[in-house]
């Protein structure tokens, strides 16, 4: 698999060196390769800001030091993606693997409450075939885990190159649980994101019961996975589901499957969700 990590660190440093009036246009140029993949109308700069991206309409002396802290990230991403491909091929030699993967990273906004409080300062999107989008504000707690987010998102590409995506709550939940289990299998539990541990105790048990009852619901499934804060943020109707609960529920279901079958997360990547859920 050919991996292309776009040099957005240089592009963002250059953008921040220009007058604020020029920055929005430069950001549009940087994001142009993925604009058509974003299923949201409007100016991509506004979408970038709404999604927790760094601000281009104001000065902030924290941005350049943050970019410096991220200087090794492209190489880390390339190395981990190569390891992920090797791990997958060792488990399932005939698995379909994308021929090319492009990665676009943007700096986050440290003042965005959702980014920093809810998702731990970073997240990614891997739904568009052949592309990963990553956003992060580096902190002492998350810096070592940022490249592993690329593996999580890449796992979605692996799964849905082998198991067709269906807009069903069960598929979305299992996909997130498998992606986190795959990261853990490849690099250890310390590499996992904070998302699957965000809901615990009675809140988790209530969320588990609700989500499992709705596994066959079709449509916009993100509300069951991301929870109410994200649903409201993007104009949806909240369902009373805690933030990120679908990750925790998905990981429990996947872990029950792994425990009962003895299979690896990599080998389970190509299984239909029904095969995984019957063991959950």
Image (cartoon, rainbow, N blue to C red):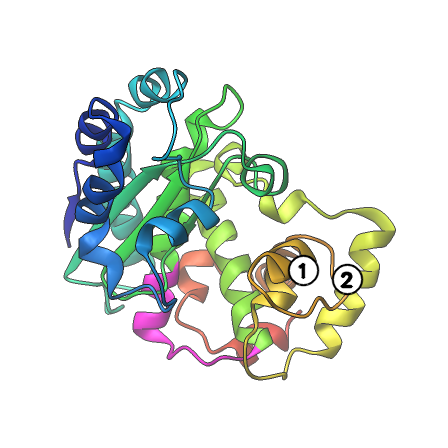
Quarter of the image that includes the C terminus: bottom right
Q: Residue at x 42, y 35 (%)?
A: 108
Q: Is residue 151 left or right of residue 204?
A: left
Image-quadrant location for residue 82:
top left
Residue 207, which numbered label? 2
Q: Nearer the viewer, residue 70 or 79?
A: 70
Q: Where does residue 191 sit, x and y in percent of width and height?
A: 48, 35
Q: Where does residue 217 sit, x and y in percent of width and height?
A: 63, 83
**Secondary element at tag 2:** helix
Image-quadrant location for residue 158:
bottom left
Q: Is residue 32 left or right of residue 271?
A: left
Q: Nearer the viewer, residue 129 or 111?
A: 111
**Secondary element at tag 1:** helix
| In the image, residue 15 lies in the stretch drawn in magenta | no
Quarter of the image that includes the N terminus: bottom left
| In the image, residue 162 lies in the stretch drawn in magenta | yes
Q: Nearer the viewer, residue 166 or 111?
A: 111
Bounds of the magenta segment: 156-168
Q: Residue at x 35, y 63 (%)?
A: 42
User: Could you tell which of marks 1 and 2 lies nearer the N-terminus?
Assistant: 2
Q: Is residue 252 left or right of residue 10?
A: right
Determine contact: label 1, label 2, CB under 8 Å. yes
Question: Between tags 1 and 2, which lies in front?
Answer: 2
- Label 1 Cα neighbours within 10 Å, binned few <14 / some 14-19 / many ≥20: many
Q: How many marks?
A: 2
Q: Is residue 29 visible?
A: yes
| Distance from Cα at disc 1 to Cα at disc 2 | 8 Å
Q: Where does residue 25 sit, x and y in percent of width and height?
A: 21, 44
Q: Quick check: 180 above or below 78?
A: below
Residue at the far right: name it: 202
User: Residue under circle 1?
Assistant: 249
């Amino acid at each position: 698999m050919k991996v292309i990590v776009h040099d957005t660190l240089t592009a963002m440093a250059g953008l921040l060196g220009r007058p604020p009036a020029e920055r929005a246009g430069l950001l549009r140029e940087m994001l142009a390769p993925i604009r058509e993949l974003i299923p949201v109308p409007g100016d991509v700069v506004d979408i970038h800001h709404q999604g927790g991206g760094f601000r281009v309409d104001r000065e902030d002396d924290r941005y350049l030091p943050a970019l410096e802290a991220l200087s090794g990230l492209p190489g880390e991403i390339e190395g981990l993606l190569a390891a992920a491909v090797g791990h997958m091929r060792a488990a399932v030699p005939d698995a379909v693997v994308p021929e090319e993967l492009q990665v676009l990273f943007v700096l986050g906004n440290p003042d965005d409450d959702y980014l920093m409080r809810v998702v731990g300062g970073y997240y990614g999107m891997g739904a568009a075939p052949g592309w990963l989008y990553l956003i992060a504000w580096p902190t002492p707690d998350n810096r070592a885990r940022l490249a592993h987010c690329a593996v999580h998102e890449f796992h979605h590409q692996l799964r849905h190159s082998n198991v067709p995506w269906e807009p069903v709550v069960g598929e979305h939940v299992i996909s997130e649980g498998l992606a986190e289990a795959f990261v853990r299998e490849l690099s250890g539990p310390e590499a996992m994101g904070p998302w699957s541990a965000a809901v615990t105790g009675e809140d988790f048990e209530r969320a588990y019961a609700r989500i499992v009852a709705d596994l066959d619901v079709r449509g916009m499934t993100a509300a069951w996975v991301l929870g109410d804060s994200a649903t409201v943020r993007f104009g949806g109707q909240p369902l009373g589901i805690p933030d990120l609960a679908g990750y925790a529920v998905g990981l429990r279901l996947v872990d029950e499957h792994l425990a009962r079958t003895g299979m690896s997360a990599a080998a389970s990547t190509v299984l239909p969700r029904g095969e995984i859920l019957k063991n959950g």
